Image (spheres, helix red, strand yellow):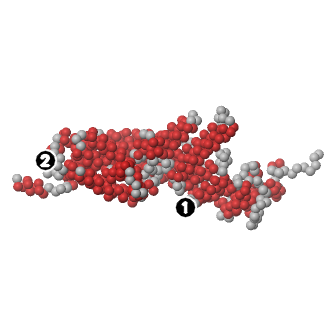
Amino acid sequence: MATNTQHFQKTSFLSFSRIGVIASHTFTQLVRMKVFYFLVVFVILLWAAKQIILPNQTGGDGSPEQELRLLKSTGFAAMNMFSMLLALSATALLIPKDIEDRTIYTILCKPVPRLDYLLGKLLGVLVLIFVSLVAMDLVLSFFLHQKASGMIALQTEQLVARGTPQEVINEQLAGLKAHGLTINIHFATIAIFLKAIVIASIALLISTFSSSTLFTLILTLIIIVIGLIQADAREYATMMAQFGEQNKLSNISLGVAIFFPDLQFLSIEDGVIDGRNVPMSIMLQISMVAILYFAIYVVLSWFAFRKKEF
Amino acid sequence: MVILAVLGVTGWLKMPYEQKLSEELHALKLVPPRLSLKDRSKLKQKAFIATYGSLRPTIAAFMSVRTTRYHSDQEWDKIENSFDEIVLLDPYNYYYWETASWHMALNAAVDQQEDKSLSEVGKDQVFKKYIKKGKDIIDRAIEINPGDWRYLNLKARLESNRYRNPDYTAAVETYRELLAIPNLADHIVRSTKLSIQHCMQHLPEWHQKSYDHALELFEKGQRYRVPTVQNEILIGQNHPLNEISHRLSLSEIYGSDKEAYTDLKIKWQRRKLGQKPYGVEYSIQELENRLKIPQATRVFPHRPLFLK
């Protein structure tokens, strides 16, 4: 008895091996739900997007770039949708499902701190999203590389045949290459993953005090929508504060800016679709903010969950 | 309560940092531009989708494909409304701005001009109205995409389109604005300067400026010695009101008599376009004599003195 108590007392607050075990169990549990079937849909979707040939209406040189943009846009939209749905639904289901299956009792009656349990569950979901996003990134990169290299070869041939100066050829191809496979594609995937991390943490926080899964889903979805326009509210509140003015709308905007996360800054894939470069400093900054959100929501989830009785 | 308090305090602390980061991202055009309330109401339910990253270009692309149907049905109002939404969804995409202005200023303008139900004055008014719509679209594009030479080039091209109510003075101004953009590629600078030359030649009162500009380009070297510049030097040298610093011979301007003859023949054929071709007729005659061009192929054959 004394040894047991001693052992219990020695239980560390945060154990990575414990978290790892819970995370791998959650990952396996989710994989068994056949979520990876989505990848088949993703491949079909991208293959279809790759086949689209946009009409060159003005006779300009913009069409090849448009086709690459469409391919990237379809890919990122699907990645966004999948990661958001998974982060939202899987996380919202985590605790209720464990309660329903009664696995939560067998876990929490052991010397497993509740923070470890929450982190393990959340990481399981995040690993699943990460693996899926890596797979989707590879598929997108493959299709994009295939389409872009084909277009570059064709354009070079046509421009050389037309006797276009090398300088012009280089510039036109640079435009195409910027829309092809670059490191920025992977940066955009990372940003989508960061967005999923924040969404999953919000869903986890809500699920710790919510009484139903549906409520968690709806409330998280509302927060996501507000989070996507939070930047507008913050800007309005900041502008009004600069002018020294205050009204009902500016107060509401300030409230939104303070209490809700900004999800817009994680939408850098729009810039990547436009063929822009993402500086490393920006990647570091957005990663830092996303991790900060993750830390805040996890700590708050633990706070709400630590004394919850089942 | 504790949760709300923590969210409030951290939210308050992160706000200035987030604002700074957001401004940086907007400056780099990495995130979608902000939509005004007016734009949101214009986009209706699409505004919600537009807030979610990466869906905007997809919707814009499919809307753009749909406009091809409106184009074949000549439904210009529908095209205008569609592109109004498309450019809101994907405002950094040159292709949509170009297509929108092309539809208005080129297709719709001509189509309306052929409307038999309108009077001649009415046709002209509608023609000009659609050209203005095309120009307005490009002006909006320039406002949203400052520093992008392609939009200024598009605007100047429309302003100098001789079939679209041209305003060559405005076109020269726009091309000069384009040249002020830093770090332009060499070939863009070259083609813009040549376009300025082309526009100047359509402004008879700019005879001196046009000649000086041509001379300046000519002195830049072989890459600028194209017929537009060479012909302007010859015409400028022969313009009665121009002040000439130093007169160049035909072979100095064109490289050789043979090349001068080829270029001047074309210029003579197109003499009704642009400025009055001072000195061209005389130069061709001189070259035909010097090169001993057979009478049958001459532009200005000798007329027989006596008819048998």
Q: Nearer the viewer, residue B191 or A246?
A: A246
Looking at the image, residue B65 lies above or below residue A184: above
Q: Tell me the CA gap for discs 1 and 2.
A: 68 Å
A270 vs A303, left or right, is right
> Looking at this rendering, what residue extends furthest in the bottom direction?
B245
Q: Quadrant of residue B40?
A: top left
Looking at the image, residue B219 lies above or below residue B201: below
Provide residue A255's location: percent of width, then percent of height.
33, 51
Quadrant the C terminus of chain B occupies? top right
Provide residue B39's location: percent of width, then percent of height.
47, 45
Q: Quadrant of residue A11?
A: bottom left
Query: Which chain's residue wears label 2?
Result: A
Query: Can you identify the residue that label 2 sits on?
Result: A109
Query: Can you identify the residue that label 1 sits on?
Result: B182
Residue type at mark 1 is: Pro
The residue drawn where x is 66% and y is 33% is: B116
> Looking at this rendering, what residue extends furthest in the left direction?
A1
Provide residue B238's location: percent of width, then percent of height.
78, 60
Q: Secondary structure at mark 2?
A: loop
